[in-house]
Amino acid sequence: MSWENLYDTLLNILYTQTGLFSLNYKIAIMWGIGLFFVYLAVAKKYEPLLLLPIGFGIFLVNFPLTPLMGVDENGKRELLNILFHYGVEWEVIPCLIFLGLGAMTDFGPFIANPKTLIIGAGAQLGVFVTFLGVLAFGFSLKEAASVGIICGADGPTTIYLTAKVAPHLLGANALAAYTYMAMVPVIQPPIMKALTTSRERKMVMKQLRPVSRREKLIFPLLVISVIALLIPAVVPLMGMFMLGNFMKESGVVDRLSKSAQGSLMNIITIFLGVSVGATMQAEKFLTAKPLLIFGFGIVGFAISTMGGILTVKFMNLFLKNKMNPLIGSAGVSAVPMAARVSQVVG
């Protein structure tokens, strides 16, 4: 083999089997976004359990020719494609996350003060505003519904609904929802401080009545019965949520409850974060529709936060025992991030 042939062979190998000749500015932008998420997780400690795997997934999948999110020559899905397809597209991971969230949830304060249900409703304002906004930009009705639900910053619900009504937007919507969940400590505090006075933020609420164990056991059974009869389509999500809560409150399956809260949630979070981040490939993400989704979503989430706070302030006009307006920002669906931020700001 002559030196010229050897040179051509090596050049062909470099061109076809490495990613060196496939690099471009879009890939560099996505690397920057992925590393920025990792920086926020590691240096700033902003929701590292979400941002670190998402950011690393973004960084990893944007290396050219990496066998991660495609299908090989035999038609088999590659590693992260397997996780995304069977976990996210098949809606398994959202339901398992709701099981863990249910096992972490204490409905005692809600049972003792059912008026807080109104706060949760008010904190969905951004969902409706965004729904109408994206319709005006040419999105279909189903696409608008899937984008609107992002504004509660509830990842599992976003994935579940989008997979049902607009599966082609699943990657962009899931990434947007989980990004907003992770960025709650950045997005919410300025809005909370702008809409409340220092006195309101320091308000100490009256101690709620004790809630009995019987009430806590009846509540998940009653709620899922009503939901199953009225809105059967959401039973896979809410059924798992109430199962997790019932396991916790029963006190007889402590090992299962702790597994759902701990090891199961940790494993699912890793798989979910990396696979959601891996959907953020440069050629798919840096287009008009995903960028519009991100823009509308963040505005809608801010409006939802405002809606929750203003709902509490309106309710206080008629209540004898006033509520701290900051609990309104916890009315969005970003659990437990929004509640944690309300605690810190207050």
Image (spheres, grey):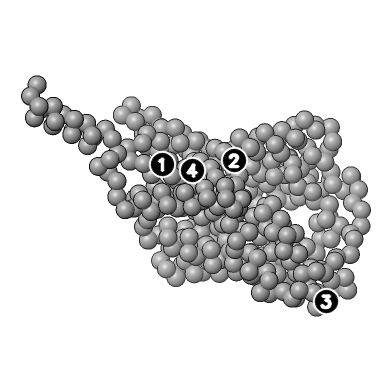
Mark 3 or 4, closer to the camera: 4
SS type, badge 1: helix
Give whichever of discs 3 and 4 has the lower sequence position.
4
Give whichever of discs 1 and 4 has the lower sequence position.
4
Q: How many C-alpha atoms fall within 10 Å of the one at disc 3: few (<14), some, or many (≥20)?
A: few
Vertical comparison of 331 with 322: above or below: above
Give whichever of discs 2 and 3 has the lower sequence position.
2
Q: How many C-alpha atoms fall within 10 Å of the one at disc 2: few (<14), some, or many (≥20)?
A: some
Q: Identify the residue under disc 3.
A: 318
Mark 2 or 3, closer to the camera: 2
Q: Marks 2 and 1: in contact by CB < 8 Å?
A: no
Q: How many C-alpha atoms fall within 10 Å of the one at disc 4: few (<14), some, or many (≥20)?
A: many
Residue at 63% from the left image edge and 69% from the top image edge: 190
Q: CA distance from mark 1 to mark 4?
A: 9 Å
Amino acid type indicated by mark 3: Phe
| Residue 115 screen position, x and y as percent | 80, 64
Residue at 84% from the left image edge and 32% from the top image edge: 252
SS type, badge 4: helix
Q: Identify the residue under disc 4.
A: 56
Vertical comparison of 193 with 101: above or below: below
Mark 1 or 3, closer to the camera: 1
Amino acid type indicated by mark 4: Phe
Q: Identify the residue under disc 2.
A: 269
| Residue 50 screen position, x and y as percent | 58, 46
Q: Nearer the viewer, residue 118 or 196?
A: 196
| Residue 232 screen position, x and y as percent | 64, 48
**Quadrant containing the N terminus in the rendered view:** top left
Q: Relative to 179, is 208 on the left or the right?
A: right
Amino acid type indicated by mark 2: Thr
